[in-house]
Amino acid sequence: MARGGGDPLRSPGVSLRQTIRATAQRFGLGRLLEEPEPLREAWSNSVFRVVTEAGTFAVKLFPAVVGPERLATLRAGMAVEAAVLKAGKVPMAEPVPDPDGGDWLVEVAVSGGGPARLARAHAWVDGRPCSAVPPSIEYARDVGRSLGFLHAMRMPAGDTSAVPPLDLERWRRAVRKARIANVPWAVDLAAHTPLVEELADRLDLLRSQRRPMLASHRDLDPKNAVVRPDGRIALTDWDYAGPVLPGVELVVAATSFADGESGVDERLVRAFVSGYHAAGGDAEPPDPLALAVEQANPDWLLRNVEGVLWDVPGDDHELRRRLAPALIGSFAQDVTALDRWARVIPQWG
C-alpha cells in the first residue's frame, strides 16, 4: 500500500490521531506504537498506516457524513469482498472484523464531539503500489488472472436498469459556476458539454435494455493494487465493488495496468488479456452502448471541479486544483481511447 511520505499537510492532527487510536481499540488492535502515517493516494477517504501491538494495519476513516446510498454501496462492496476472500484465489488485503460483532464497518466516536465516523481496518500488505512501479508484463498478466477469476465466479448483480443516469444538471451547474468563477479551464469544461450530453443519451438507452451485470471489483487500477515481496499483486480497496459489464471492466483495467510514460503499451494489454482468459474470464466484447457505463460517469472529474469551485472544509484543495484541469484536458481523449481499445482487445481472445 502507498505510504504517506511525511507530508506535514496530511499528517493527522491531535483530534484525528485520537480518532485513529479509538478505531484501533474498537477493532481490538491494541496500543499504537508509531505515529499514524497517511497514505498518499487515499483521495476519497482518510487512510493511514497504523502500527500497533497487534501488527501493522491500514485504517480507513470515511467522511463525517455518509448518506444511505453510499452506505448501501459500502455494504454491497463488502459482500463482494467477502465472497472473493472466501474463494481464496485472489491475493487481497485481509479485512479486520470488529471483535464484538464481527462487522467490518464500525462507528467510532470522534474526539471533541461531533458525529461518529465510520471506519474499517485491513491487515497491511507489504510491498509497493502498482502506481509507484513501472508497468510490466508479469504484473499485467497477474492482475489479469485475478480479474479473470472474478468474472469466472459469475456473481449476479442485477441489470443495467440500476445504473444511475448521468446527472446533466450537476454537469451544467459546474459549467455555470466555473464561468462565474472565471477559472482558467472554464471554457474547456464547457466545450465538453455536447459530448457529455451524447454519452448521457447512450447511457439512457443502455439502461432501458436491462443487460445483465456481474459483481466485481469495479475500481481496479494501479493505485488499488500492491506488488507483494513474492511478486504477486494483491488487490485492495473493495469499497466500490459491485455491478459491472465484464467486457467494459476488462478494457478499462487492462489499459490502466499498461499505461506508462509513453502511453498504453500493447504488449502489456496483451499480457493482461492472456492472464484473464487463462483464469476463466470470458467477457463479451463491449459495444459503444456498454462503454457508456464508464464513459458517461464523469463523477471523479466533477468531484475535483467542485472541490475547486466550492469551499468544502477539510478537503484537499491543492490536490483538486491540480487534478481538475488535467482531468478536463484528457476527458475527450479518454473516451476515444476506450472506444479504440474496445475494438482491438476482442481480437486477441
Image (spheres, rainbow, N blue to C red):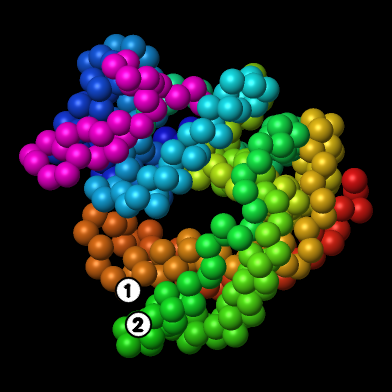
Q: Residues within 10 Å of mark 1 (few under 14, many from 20)?
A: some
Q: Nearer the viewer, residue 163 or 23?
A: 163
Question: In the orientation shown, which residue stands out farthest toward the left?
Answer: 112
* Residue designated by label 1: 309
SS for dot 2:
helix
Do the numbered discs 2 and 1 sit on residues whose CB atoms are within 8 Å? yes
Q: Residues within 10 Å of mark 2 (few under 14, many from 20)?
A: some
Q: Nearer the viewer, residue 317 or 7?
A: 317
Which three-letter amino acid code belongs to the residue tagged 1?
Leu
Which three-letter amino acid code belongs to the residue tagged 2?
Lys
Residue 16, by quadrant, is top left
Is residue 236 shown in magenta?
no
Please state the horizontal and vertical placement of residue 220, each as a whole percent of the image: 60, 44
Mark number displayed over residue 167: none
In the rendered view, would you say 77 is above or below 345? above
Q: Which residues are magenta?
A: 92-119
Q: Nearer the viewer, residue 96 or 3?
A: 96
* Residue designated by label 2: 177
